[in-house]
Image: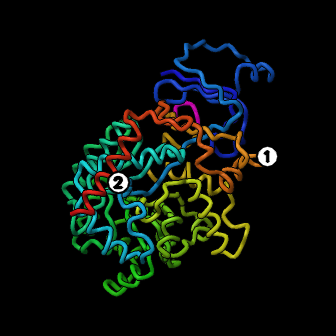
Amino acid sequence: MNIRIYNARILTMEENVPVFAGEIQVTGNKIAYVGPTADEKDAMGENTKVEEKIWDREIDAKGNLIMPGFKNAHTHSAMTFLRSYADDLPLLDWLNKQVFPMEAKLTPEDIYHLSKLAIMEYLTSGMTANFDMYLTPETVAQASLDCGYRTVLCGAFNNFSQSIEELEDWYQRYNEKDSLVHFELGFHAEYTNSRENLEKLAELSHKYHAPLYTHSSESRSEVEECIGRYGMTPTALLDKLGIFDYGGGCYHCVHMTDEDLEILKEKNIYVVTNPGSNVKLASGIARLEDMLERGIHVAIGTDGPASNNCLDMFREMFLATGLAKIKADDASALDADKVLRMATVEGAHAMRLFDADVLAAGKLADLVMIDLHQPNMQPINNLTKNIVYSGSKQNVKMTMVNGKVLYEDGQFHIGVRPEDVYAKANEIIGRMKCN
């Protein structure tokens, strides 16, 4: 489709480009033009001779903000079935006594339906892509494709599920050009993998010169137990084994030593912070300000809806900056502009979605319209600070993925009725409770 969005405020998220008034033109799944309207060009004395296009749809933004969609750089979508089921427990008890036993009852078809529920919530929060680590990548991929949503899959290899052979197969199968779905090599964590497994992962990474992604240093006990097993932190161990030789990312990174941070910097490892989940599970507060000062790239994720409950990038952004200020005992720490970049550009780069990071001609048409005609967005003293400090899901007016409007004014356009998705999710958890 050819879509024109005009009468908009535009935040491209490009370096040193302020918000400006203009329009965006989308052809197929790509941005064809972003800039001033013809009238504005005339006023600036610029040549306005452009080829006229026939638009399938023209959208009057009415002064609202168009910006790149948020990127949820770490999540477990299908864990929607455990939302508000196993709360108020320490991390390892929550994981071993509640999550793992219930996950053992999941079928691939369950994961397909539960992933759709998460995708709907991502859309309401202006997220145009997610980095999903879960048990059956095939059914997660199918849910995303059926909804028209962009997902980067991440392996969840561990001692109990998935295999090196499956990781390699998924890596080869889901990395076709121009697909909505891609795959990155990954494993659950150091503490759920034997040393032999970790060595196999390093070999696979070296074979394809591919990055690896994993949970790391989420809790203090996780780090202490790793030191007890190997005499070093998870970060140091994984580095020693060659896991980080081709880059990648670590989720959480709450309990990191200075040595750990130097390793992440040296190996160009992305940190994906999950403040909502870390607060709820009392895991601690990540050293985001220290990381950024060292030049480490930081993105933001929600984690899964079992540990966070709410898949909301606005809440994550506020918590990221608020907790960083408390950690640093400095109200100037981690300003809103940095946080907004973490939630968009850095998230895209962490997920290797380099063609979906900013709004520019030739980039993927993954964008969100933020409703500024609401009390929490007025007055417009500073738009980026409004988004981070006072924004919420209620301000997401439209979410476009791959050039298609999937969510607009509270309505979903993903090929399935919301009521059917809700009914299926409740049917799945109801069956599990009975078994």
Magenta region, residue range: 359-363
> Which quadrant, please, contains the C terminus?
bottom left
Seen in the picture, residue 339 relative to 176 is either above or below; the reply is below
Please give left or right for residue 114 compared with residue 315 in the image: left
Residue drawn at 66 percent across, 38 percent down: 65
Q: Quadrant of residue 36?
A: top right
Neighbour class for label 2 at 10 Å: few (<14), some, many (≥20)?
many
Task: Say what secondary structure mark 1 lies in.
Answer: loop
Name the one closer to the observer, 66 or 51: 66
Name the one closer to the observer, 196 or 342: 342
Magenta-drawn stretch contains 360: yes
Please give left or right for residue 51 compared with residue 19 in the image: left
Q: Quadrant of residue 205?
A: bottom left
Q: Name the residue under label 2.
A: 78
Residue 379 badge:
1
Seen in the picture, residue 342 relative to 34 is either above or below; the reply is below
Q: Which amino acid does label 1 sit on?
A: Pro
Where is residue 192? Give x, y as percent: 29, 72
Please give left or right for residue 304 compared with residue 321 in the image: left
Magenta-drawn stretch contains 68: no
Task: Say what secondary structure mark 2 lies in.
Answer: helix
Residue drawn at 43 percent across, 65 percent down: 307
Where is residue 44? Give x, y as percent: 80, 23
Cα distance, mark 2 to mark 1? 39 Å
Where is residue 161? Give x, y as percent: 22, 63
- Which label's residue is closer to the chain start, 2 or 1? 2
Neighbour class for label 1 at 10 Å: few (<14), some, many (≥20)?
few
Please give left or right for residue 128 compared with residue 148 in the image: right
Q: Is the image coloured rainbow, by chain, by secondary structure, or in one colour?
A: rainbow
